[in-house]
Image (tube, helix red, strand yellow):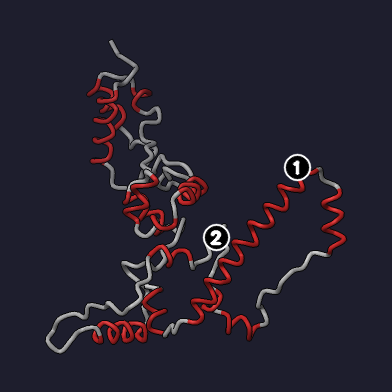
Amino acid sequence: MVVRELSDTEREAILREVLLKSNGSYTARLPNGFGAYLAEKYNRDVTTIRSGNMKVSVASQKKGRVVWKKLYPPDQVKAKFLQIPLAERTTLRSVAEKSGIMLPTLHRYMQHGMFRAHSNATKPLLTDANKCARFQFAAAKVRMDGEMHDMTDEVHVDEKWFYMTKVYGDNSYKVPHLSKEKLMRKGLLPVNVVCPEDVYGAAKASLDAIDVAAMEESIEEELRESRAVNELAQELESMICSTTWWMLLML
């Protein structure tokens, strides 16, 4: 009795025999007599042996562009970064702890350009002049006997002040003396804006007494904050801030 269907094992065995006998001159048609030989050996009909078993594809079954799947899309990574305070984004390890994204994943995302690294206090991007000034400052604090200077007559700038002097997002305060001369040369110094009295009076007339009191209180609060920042800036401008001091502040 001849069985027509071939099992996977028999089909693989037949294919191996065909490949062993093949000299590369045929791929889809069996040589004369070889089909009958295989049919008799495996107790199958010769048409079963010749029914397309020679057409084998070894091409990859992956369709399209195959890349690694991103666990977090770029928009989600950006949202997670914005939820982390700036002071806690100094290293990838701290970002991984706060965002919940694994450290190797963050490193791979950075290599693919989803975000970029900045200089920080741990590994600052110093030029040769910066390194020389930093070394001179440190060497000046070592006494002849090898002991460090106690620096009791030095002004120490807290790390919080370093973050406050930078402008990021909603933080609109920056010490004016740090770039006032450069802005003056460019003609970009801020100017005072005065609200005309008639406009201010018309605005008050359109509000009730409660809203007018709330508006005036809000304006007074803004004026107090502006005066406080102005006084602080004037005090800083009166100090002797050397280039080395500012360079160390940026580290």
Front-most of 15 and 62? 62
Front-most of 48 and 242? 242
Specify the quadrant that holds the N terminus: top left
Seen at 33% across and 37% down, the residue is 31
Q: Residues within 10 Å of mark 2 (few under 14, many from 20)?
A: few
Q: Residues within 10 Å of mark 1 (few under 14, many from 20)?
A: few
Front-most of 61 and 38? 61
Secondary structure at numbered mark 2: loop
Classify residue 181 as left or right of residue 81. Answer: right
Secondary structure at numbered mark 1: helix
Residue furthest top as drawn: 1
Residue 219 is situated, as x and y percent measured from the top left of the image, at 69, 56
Residue furthest bottom as drawn: 144
Contact check, label 2 and label 1, Cβ < 8 Å: no
Front-most of 96 and 19? 96
Classify residue 30 as left or right of residue 70. Answer: left
Residue 169 is situated, as x and y percent measured from the top left of the image, at 55, 58
Seen at 40% across and 73% down, the residue is 250
Above or below for 2 versus 182: above
Which three-letter amino acid code belongs to the residue tagged 1? Ile
Disc 2 versus disc 1: distance between alpha carbons? 30 Å
Specify the quadrant that holds the C terminus: bottom left
Q: Which mark is residue 195?
A: none
Residue 20 is situated, as x and y percent measured from the top left of the image, at 23, 41
Q: Which mark is residue 210?
A: 1
Residue 126 is situated, as x and y percent measured from the top left of the image, at 36, 78
Seen at 68% across and 82% down, the residue is 187
Q: Which residue bears the numbered disc 2?
A: 171
Above or below for 80 versus 160: above
Q: Quadrant of residue 92?
A: bottom left
Q: Quadrant of residue 124?
A: bottom left
Quick one: label 2 or label 1, which is nearer the N terminus? 2
